[in-house]
Image: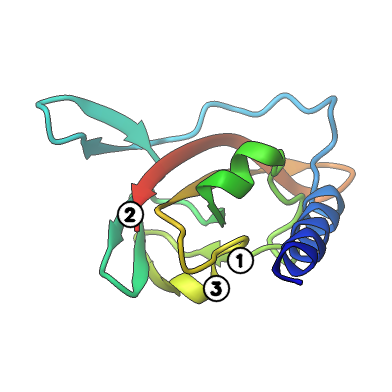
Amino acid sequence: MKLIERGIETALVLIVAVACASPADSEPRSPALGAVDEGDGQRAERYVEVEATGKALRIRNLTDEEIGYAVVEAETATVALFPPCTTPNACPTLAPHGTVVVAYEEIAGYHGGSAEAVVSAWNYVPDPQYGKRAGRMTQTRVRL
């Protein structure tokens, strides 16, 4: 039964991902990315900083722009491709320098044995046909 529930959950996530897909012919502009300390003296350019608090992920927007984001359990993210949403109304957004807390139970594909999640974040760029569309995407893998 657990396998069937997981299959249904994965199918629903895929349906949402397809519905949120951006047009393939898009040419995103270069966004202003924030820098995150990787802990080994390296800094990586990302839109968000992610912290696992034990029961939730705290996600902070490092940019001066509104961004879109999605949080997916790492094994689920490996199985399915999650394209960014086309419009801010289709997926959650994060205000410039804003912070959001995502409970582990709210992570797509999360289960009791989940060890990692993938946080995808993207900027939105103007689009004459759609108003806004997803631009460049970054991903952050975090241990739960």
Residue type at the position of mark 2: Val
Q: Position of residue 122 (x, y in %)?
A: 56, 44
The C terminus: image quadrant:
bottom left
Identify the residue position indicated by label 1 in the image.
Answer: 92
Closer to viewer: mark 2 or mark 1: 2
Identify the residue position indicated by label 3 in the image.
Answer: 106
Q: CA distance from mark 1 to mark 3?
A: 12 Å
Q: For the residue labelled by badge 1, is the local secondary structure a helix, a strand or a loop? A: loop
Identify the residue position indicated by label 2 in the image.
Answer: 50
User: In the picture provided, is 37 more to the left or to the right than 74?
Assistant: left
The N terminus: image quadrant:
bottom right
> In terms of sequence position, does the residue under pointer 1 or pointer 3 come before the other?
1
Is 115 drawn above or below residue 12 in the view shown? above
Q: Identify which residue, 125 or 15, lies in the foreground.
A: 15
Q: CA distance from mark 3 to mark 2?
A: 15 Å
Q: Position of residue 143 (x, y in %)?
A: 33, 51
Q: Position of residue 57 (x, y in %)?
A: 36, 65
Residue type at the position of mark 3: Glu
Residue 63 tag number: none
Residue type at the position of mark 1: Pro
Q: For the residue labelled by badge 3, is the local secondary structure a helix, a strand or a loop? A: helix
Furthest-left residue in this view: 41
Q: CA distance from mark 2 to mark 1?
A: 16 Å
